[in-house]
Amino acid sequence: MTPTDERELLLRRVRSAVGKHGAEAGGAAPAEGARNPLAEDERLDLFERMFLSAGGVIFRGPMEKVMSDLGEILRTEGVAALFFPEDDASAREIAEALVPFGPFHLTTGAEVRGGSPAVTAGFRSAEAGIAETGTVVETSAGGRTLLPGLLADVHVSLLPASSVVERMDEALAALAAGPPRNISFLSGPSKSADIEQTLAVGAHGPRKVIVLLV
């Protein structure tokens, strides 16, 4: 598929999502090849396969085992400091519980933004996951910060299993009623091959993205 084809596909899905939202308000939604939706376990399995294929790391299972494995991978990445949005209770709980597994220390987004020399892991709750592309969706809705997924060396996204949808248009439709100013679509670590066609990981964002599927 060429870049032009991918762009047209994305535009069709955006138009479809807007059309579906209009149908809920009394308008007519355009028909788009009916097919049976995936069951929840199929959606989660597809999301995991696609996210892993993009270079991401995903943890599912008992939280005790997850915390131990997450602590180990953060140590391997050289992480020393953990931060999270002040208004994100779930991210705070995970980060605080991880401190003894480092040992790590807690910092703030403001300190990281100011140029903290420590290797950091940023924690944040995600709004949605898209199974077909293995993508995590994080938005600025309600004034929420996106810094943990932009500035951290390692990003840890907390994704509720119930928030994983099958297709991108479903995720966009859920945001149509009150579109946020900013949306991050995260599919694995940041990558770029702009310079001499040499792939660099972590060039414009986290070098590792981890999803806790909760």
Image (spheres, rainbow, N blue to C red):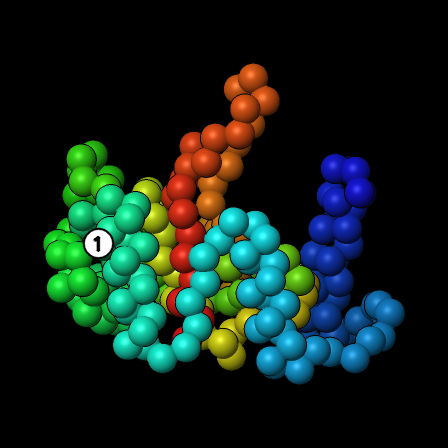
- Residue 151 is situated, as x and y percent measured from the top left of the image, at 33, 42
Query: On screen, 155 above or below 33?
Result: above
Residue at 23 percent across and 71 percent down: it is 93
Residue found at x 26% / y 60%:
71
Residue 29: x and y in percent read 80, 71
Q: Can I make out residue 177 in this image?
A: no
160 relative to 42 in the view: left or right: left
Quarter placement of the N terminus: top right
State the residue at coordinates (75%, 62%): 16
104 or 162, nearer to the observer: 104
Quarter of the image for the C terminus: give it: bottom left
**Element under disc 1:** strand
Q: Is residue 33 above or below residue 79?
A: below
Residue 70, image quadrant: bottom left
At x 82% / y 76%, what residue is drawn?
35
**Residue 12 vertical position relative to residue 174 in the rendered view, above or below:** above
Counting from the top left corner in percent of width and height, residue 197 is at 59, 22
- For residue 175, what is the image quadrant? bottom right
Which of the two residues, 181 or 91, is positioned nearer the viewer here?
91
Instruction: Give the amino acid at mark 1.
Output: Leu
Which residue bears the numbered disc 1?
Answer: 82
Q: Residue 106 appears at what percent x and percent y?
A: 14, 55
How many dots with numbers? 1
